[in-house]
Structures are given as C-alpha cells and as structure tokens.
Amino acid sequence: MHRVQVPELAERMVLGPQDTRHLQVLRLRVGECVQVFDGRGAQGVGRLTELEPGRAVLERDHQAQASARGAETPQPVTLAVALLKGDKLADVVRAATELGAARIQLLVTAHAEAREIGAQKLVRLRRIASEAARQSERSVTPEVVEPVRLMECDWQGTLLVAHPGAQARITDFLSWEAPLTVLSGPEGGLSEAEVAWLTERGAQAVTLGPRILRAETAPLALLGAIAAQGQ
C-alpha cells in the first residue's frame, strides 16, 4: 500500500497540490486506500474519495490496518551535523531519515566552508526528510532545524562526537536510558577548541574506525552503527 504524509490524522484529510500530484503519479483512483502518517508517530489508512487537479481528499478507514514496520528507537536520536558544501546535506538528510534519526540539527562550525543556508534550501531538506520517511515506512519525519553555532548547541541525554583518534566505541555508551545525540563535523573537521568545549560538558568522543571518512559519510556511519544494534 502506498504512503502519504498528512498534517494530522483526521476523519477527513485534504491534500495539497504536491501530495495530490504524488497520488496521480501512482495512478491511484477514487476508492483506493493509502497508508497515512502525520510524521509524529501516528499512522492509519485513508480511502481516496476525491481526486482532482491540485486537490485530493482522504477519509479515514478504521477497518484497515497500517503497516507495523518502521519502529522507532527506544529513545529519540538527534543527528547534529555541520553545514556541508554543495548538495551533500540532501544526501545526509535522506539517509539519516532512513537510518532512524528523529531530529536533524544543522551546525555552523569553525572549519566549515559553508556558513549559512538559504530558506529555500531548508524547505527542500525538510521535504526530502518527509519523502524519505514515506519511502522507508517510518511514522516519524525528523525535524530539520535551522543552523546554530556549535557552541550554542544544546542537547539532552548522551552526546557522542565522531573524532579521529578517539578510542571509545559507540557501543560503550549506547544504553537507551536517555535521548541520544550524535555529532559530526565539516570537511575540515571540528577544531580542538570545539571538541574540548563539547567534552568538558559531558560529550563522549568516539571512533568510527581506523579510516578518515568524508564529512558526508561520517554522520551516516554514526547512525548506521546505532541502527545495526537492532533497536
């Protein structure tokens, strides 16, 4: 069954032009059902009752059951990632959504070549997260948060920082007793001052293995190691 994100689960759900176009591309017809999810954990089934250019209407079908796939981690996982050059963030957001990130916090860091992000690019990243959540059968769409300076970043629970030369492993700190944040730097890496500031506040520096990873690979290696635990 195809899936579509809606603003909220209701008895009657009206879709805008973009989601309507998606249904038309799928060649759905009035009377057929789709899985619906609100991006915050709720999901169900909607029956298509109206379909016209730029507008579609779904009515909640309480008799049908939504897929049970896409279970979330025991505690939410935030990816804090430095701004990257070009379109690398789009690939990171897409894969991070598939790997279970519940929130994506963009960071401005000392060595980053990218210092800001335009409003339209932020909108696009959020749309990519929604599309990836739909494709991967998640009921949660991660929030993509506008950038803050790394030393203004706040977190709850455990913070793991990918840092070359660290000896500790991710699994040393993965207890699921509290929310988890994983952080990776830009193409030039985090500065020593940034790493020191983070560790002084309780962050744990962790290794991603013996190789130096690209800035767009490191955040996915962090999330992949967590996803591999089977939670």
Image (cartoon, rainbow, N blue to C red):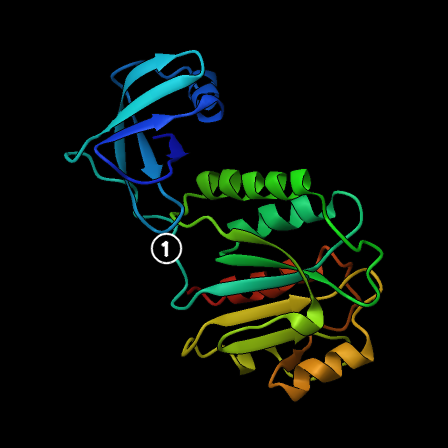
Q: Quadrant of residue 53?
A: top left
Q: Quick check: 149 left or right of 52?
A: right
The residue where tag 1 is placed is 71
Q: Quadrant of residue 31?
A: top left
Residue at the extreme bottom: 200
Q: Position of residue 195 (x, y in %)?
A: 74, 79
Vertical placement of residue 213 versus 4, above or below: below
- How packed mark 1 is, by other alpha carbons closer than 10 Å (few <14, some 14-19, many 20 or more), is few
Q: Looking at the image, which residue is at 62% across and 81% down?
A: 203
Q: Position of residue 102 (x, y in %)?
A: 48, 58
Q: Looking at the image, which residue is at 73% across and 75% down?
A: 163
> What is the quadrant of the N terminus in the image?
top left
Residue at the extreme top: 52
Q: Is residue 166 visible?
A: no
Q: Quadrant of residue 109?
A: bottom right
Q: Amino acid at mark 1?
A: Ala
Foreground pick, 155 / 160: 155
Foreground pick, 77 / 173: 77
Q: Position of residue 146 (x, y in %)?
A: 62, 54
Foreground pick, 173 / 123: 123
Q: Looking at the image, which residue is at 80% across and 67% down?
A: 212
Q: Quick check: 177 left or right of 61?
A: right
Secondary structure state at the residue bearing disc 1: loop
Vertical placement of residue 163 versus 213, above or below: below
Q: Quick check: 111 left or right of 71?
A: right
> What is the quadrant of the C terminus in the image?
bottom left
Q: Looking at the image, which residue is at 70% across and 84% down?
A: 167
